[in-house]
Amino acid sequence: MMHAKERLKNNVFEYAIALITLVVVLLIPFYTGLYQVNVFTYYLICAILGISIYFIWGIAGIFSFGQAAFMGIGGYAYAILSKHFDDPSKCLLYAAVAIAIACAVAAILGYFMFYGGINDVFVGLITMCVTISCQTFMSQTAGSQWQILGVALGGDNGLNDIPGLTIGYYRFNELSLFFLLVILVAAFYIVIKIVEHRKFGYAMLSVRENRTRSELLGYDTAKLQVIVFTIGGGIAALAGVLYCCWGYYITPASMSLKASTIPVVLAAAGGKRSLISVILFTVLYYILSNYLTSAGADTLLMLGALLIVVILVLPQGIFATIIQKLQGLIQKAEA
Amino acid sequence: MKNHMLELRHVSKSFGGIKAVEDLSISVDQGDIHCLIGPNGAGKTTAFRMITGQYSLTSGKVLFEGKEISGKKAHHIVQSGISMKMQIPGVFEALTIRENLRIAAGNYVRSREMEERIDELIELVHIKDLGNRYVKNLSHGQQQWLEIAMALATNPRLLLLDEPAAGMGPEETAFTGELVKELNKSGLTILFIDHDMDFVKQIAQKVTVMHYGKLFAQGSVEEITHHDGVKQIYLGSV
């Protein structure tokens, strides 16, 4: 009980921001058109990818560029299954199988990396190579010989006409898909916040902070890293499935160097060790990017410049620093 | 006759062509406070790292309570009942004291008993009023005590302390000595490394001297402090 009170006291500002954000986002359909709602759904899918990066990097210290690859694997697997079986009532089953496939790939890759003693920046390099390899491979699958379960992979054009999300006999439209995404992001926030303060959460923290010490406290660090990497791959794969359900297509570009780098940069700039900062910064970046791109600005260049400033001035991330300062002020005022 | 809790049998460790530890045989009896001394580079910390599985052995065997533990991974060795406080405090500086202890006790205490266990541990090492403070804001001595508490959180039967009083003032050193004796009285066997001979005399029952990776001398504190060879290679210089 004391633990819960202490946690609430230390995070009251973050929880307040999370709640206000949830209310504001839920109200979006009431003050914008359906087009904007649909675009915002995409931002929330990007937020789920950001959550997967927070989970592996922010909590457990695994620096990876592989989340885009797992998103792509999840997306492609879902697309192939749903196109092959063509039974919309089994959407959830296809999604579950697609996520399981991505988890298996993450587990195998994670096993060889972490039990092989590979860590830190080398994990980043290997996962970047894996992501680029996935994109390069999928890009050259334009010929008719490249089929899985009779579904042509389509090379650079990818897979189109993927059936939308259906649960039972209910087919999701733009509005209900938006609300589903809001619920999913909120659920991830709550579950991860709970897990962070359970034994598994502290074990992940331990691995992030000092692997030698963790081993000397009896933690099997390699096993923990494989588990975290696999779950992170699963969350990214869910983002891939939802991306297919949202846009009805997937292309190798979803596994490009740019696709794998931007979410990592957004997590770093927002504050990789603060879940709310990663979610908010990701969504705000895409809102701003959409607005500025239509005004002719190069948002990627701006993001790059911003990251340099963040690394030099606010290494904990912009939003994380602001939240931490304001939380500190609240605690000072209380004292 | 006491049982051997820990035995190192003809243990060696080489790094390339350098023999850090060579044909070392030591036994630590159950219930003892046993000290490992020797000049810098004698191989003391390397021996600790071999016991805890951080380093593989080039040759030889390590036995804990009669069972061979050499070749096992560090986390298995810790789970079997050996815990270690490192030379440079291996505490998690970015976290609070209570968070450090939650991590340390995570594998050994049920969730509902966790906070009670943390209270016990921070009271034991005299950092009770600092529980919610970030570890980076603690003094060096407090960090050393926290790490001892973290090592204790794993419920060890053998505690390895690598320079538990290093960098401490006289009062902190005296408290650390009393703490180690108290832990020993409660049934814990302790093997420690230290350079401070006053501290060694305060708590140790047996002393092993290492020199150039080899066993140089072994005996009671009295025997070692009067050993001519030990005086020549080590005690004369401290």
Image: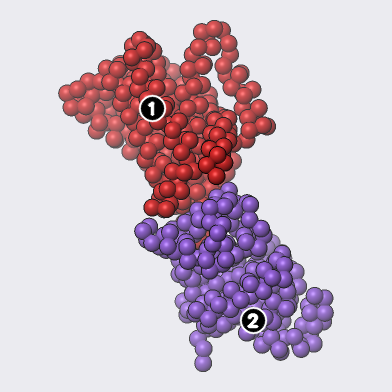
Give a yes or no on whether discs 2 and 1 share a subunit. Answer: no
The residue lying toward the viewer, choosing from B32 and A235, is B32
Task: Give the residue at x 42% y 53%.
Answer: A2
Q: Residue at x 31, y 23 (%)?
A: A179
Q: Is residue B23 above or below residue B120?
A: below
Percent position of residue A64, x then y: 52, 37
Please tell me whether mark 2 or mark 1 is closer to you in this view. Answer: 1
Chain ID at mark 1: A
Query: How far from the left and from the top, in percent, is residue B89?
Result: 63, 60
- Residue B163 vs residue A110, the one in the foreground: B163
Does the image show residue B137? Answer: yes
Q: Which residue is mark 1?
A: A22
Chain in purple, by letter, is B
Residue carrying label 2: B204
* Amino acid, disc 2: Ala
In which image quadrant can residue B86 be found?
A: bottom right
Vertical order, B25 against A45 (above or below):
below
Residue A1 location, x and y as percent?
A: 38, 52
In the rendered structure, the answer to whether residue A299 lies left or right of residue A179 reads: right
Q: Residue furthest left?
A: A169
Q: Residue at x 24, y 28 (%)?
A: A91
Query: Alpha-carbon distance for marks 2 and 1?
Result: 61 Å
Protein image colouring:
by chain
Chain colored red: A
- Type of amino acid under label 1: Leu
Q: Residue at x 47, y 33 (%)?
A: A276
Residue B145, position as x, y percentages in the image:
60, 65
* Front in this rendered view, residue A315 or B113: B113
- Specify few, some or many for label 2: CA neighbours under 10 Å numbering under 14, 14-19, or 20 or more: many
Q: Quadrant of the C terminus of chain A?
A: top right
Q: Is residue A128 at least partly visible in the picture? A: no
